[in-house]
Image (cartoon, grey):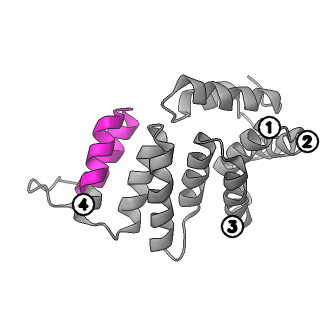
Amino acid sequence: MAINLSGQDAAAHRLLSCVHLLRKQYDKAIAESQKAVELDPNSSGVNFIYGMVLQAAGQYEEAIPVLKKAIRLNPVTPINYLNNLAWAYTGVKQYEQAIPLWNRAVERNPDYLFAYMGLTAAHQILGQENRARECAAELIRIKPNFSVTLVEKQLMVRTEEDKKRILEAFRKAGIPE
């Protein structure tokens, strides 16, 4: 796909934002997402990417209203929108807000790995150890080779504190190293 050189193509900026995010170039990803939103403020997809980038960059407070807007703009909310909003709530330690979002995702797709990841961590952090272990068992059912090491390599969080909190929750819930 060729990038529109005029700079006025929201889809191109959204794509560039995703590329920068994968490279963990958070500031560049945010800048490209902001440009995409400026060009197409009522696009659910553009707002979702912006919110996802903010969430991955550790800017959870800023991500929450953006992700809520993406959900509001799409009457058939994709489960990854719910997942990213839940992770943003997790980033601000509002686990009680995150859990219902992940539960909605699981209702729509009982094998949605990312929701079970969040549920495992949130329940464990809240001290709901039995529920955390049940969710961890679902993770292993869905992905038998699921491990803390695998999560550590793929977890898109900016701060070490956030990463440690999530990884420790997985360990306590019984996820193998």
Residue 122: x %, y % from top left: 73, 43
Mark 3–mark 2 CB contact (< 8 Å):
no
N-terminal of the pair, mark 4 or mark 2, is: 4
Q: Is residue 54 left or right of residue 94?
A: left
Circle 4 residues within 10 Å: few <14, some 14–19, many ≥20: few
N-terminal of the pair, mark 1 or mark 2, is: 1
Residue that label 2 marks = 130
Q: Residue at 74%, 47% (x, y): give it.
A: 119
Q: Is residue 6 left or right of residue 147?
A: left
Q: Residue at 66%, 47% (x, y): give it.
A: 94
Q: Amino acid at mark 4?
A: Glu
Give the CA distance from mark 3 to mark 4: 32 Å
Q: Nearer the viewer, residue 56 or 135?
A: 56
Residue that label 3 marks = 108
> As displayed, is residue 74 above or below residue 48?
below
Give the number of the mark in front: 3 or 4: 4
Taking the magenta stretch, the answer to whether it contains residue 21 is yes
Q: How many circles with numbers are drawn on the protein?
A: 4
Residue that label 1 marks = 124
Q: Which residues are magenta?
A: 10-35
Q: Is residue 13 left or right of residue 103?
A: left
Circle 3 residues within 10 Å: few <14, some 14–19, many ≥20: few
Helix or strand or loop: what does disc 1 sit on?
A: helix
Residue 97: x %, y % from top left: 68, 55
Q: Amino acid at mark 3?
A: Arg
Helix or strand or loop: what does disc 3 sit on?
A: helix
